[in-house]
Image (cartoon, coloured by chain):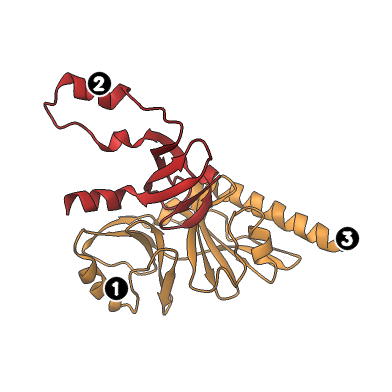
Chain colours: A orange, B red
Amino acid sequence: MPSLIAKSPLDGKSLTMGGVTLAEAVPGPITSVAPFAGREAELSQALRSLGLSFPAPNTFNESSGDLIVWTGRDQAFLIGPLLEGLPAATTDQSDGWAALSVSGPDAAAALMRLIPLDLRVAAFPPGRAARAPLNHMAAVIWRDGEGFTLLVFRSMAQTAWHEIETAMKALAARAAVGA
Amino acid sequence: MRLNCPLCGPRDRREFYYYGSEDYLNRPAEGAAPQAWDDYLHLRDNPAGVTKDLWYHELGCASWLRVTRNTLTHEILATELVADLKREATA
């Protein structure tokens, strides 16, 4: 098979404004993992070899660059490794999503203009994840270290960028007039 | 209006899609009398008070919920996962 040139949804762009940095993230292959009924323990065993565990609702966990994030009832996205023969329904979703990283001291403030959740660190500490709307877009969001990673449908990458950029501009304008 | 998703926590009504009465959970068995199918498809109560209906957490965890609410006071009394109800029914 010929090897094709992969194009990322946002051409790797990044933008810093005020206390927020928005950048495209390249998380690696994304596989949705939905455990077969009654075989959850087997799946946990298989994930343990990577240092991961099947995430409880609204959480994620990671180990040496591999990550698994809860994305719905009995479903998670495994990001990074490709595993064969898991006791779960697995689907390659890599090309279906655009990943955005939002970091900096005002990252939560910018995102909270679009996502109706309390994303401040007290309510949404590292290790937390959520399925939530980013304005009208279905998104997956989790807090990693300094900021957040978001997944939106790839077809909405530019819209998501535009929405977040608009929120960043509004925040920066507010800071400029000292309000 | 806010619904307390059993998985995601309290979320805004706009994240949910309204489907209709919980009657949809009680599908008649194959070969049931036409009357049972007629009831299932067309006949609904319209209570002034407590009612149970199905909602879908479209912009969240994609779960179906059974919401118990009061149409007079707009109070939400319970939100349950349909999957759990089914699991209990078959257990």
Circle 1: residue type? Leu
- Please, what is the three-letter code of the amino acid marked with disc 3? Val
Q: Is residue A169 visible?
A: yes
Q: Residue at x 46, y 39 (%)?
A: B17
Query: Residue lying furthest right in this view?
Result: A177
In this orientation, which residue lies closer to the viewer: A134 or A84?
Answer: A134
Q: Is residue B28 above or below residue A29?
A: above
Q: Earlier in the sequence, mark 1 or mark 3?
A: 1
* Residue A84 place in picture, x, y as percent: 24, 65
Q: Position of residue A147 (x, y in %)?
A: 60, 70
For disc 1, the chain is A
Q: Residue at x 35, y 69 (%)?
A: A81
Rendered view: A137 above or below A68: above
Label 1 element class = helix
Which residue is labeled 1 in the image?
A47
**Mark 3, residues whose alpha carbon is within 10 Å: few (<14), some, or many (≥20)?**
few
Report crowding for label 2: few under 14, some 14 to 19, many 20 or more residues within 10 A (C-alpha).
Answer: few
**Dot 2: element:** helix
Left/right of residue B87 with respect to residue A102 in the rendered view: left
Residue behind mark 2: B38
Q: Seen in the image, is A50 located left or right of residue B30?
A: right
Q: CA distance from mark 2 to mark 1?
A: 49 Å
Chain containing mark 3: A
Q: Position of residue A11 (x, y in %)?
A: 57, 57
Residue A7 visible in the displayed image: no
Disc 2 marks a residue whose amino acid type is Asp
Q: State yes or no: discs 2 and 3 in contact (Cβ < 8 Å).
A: no
Give the residue at mark 3: A177
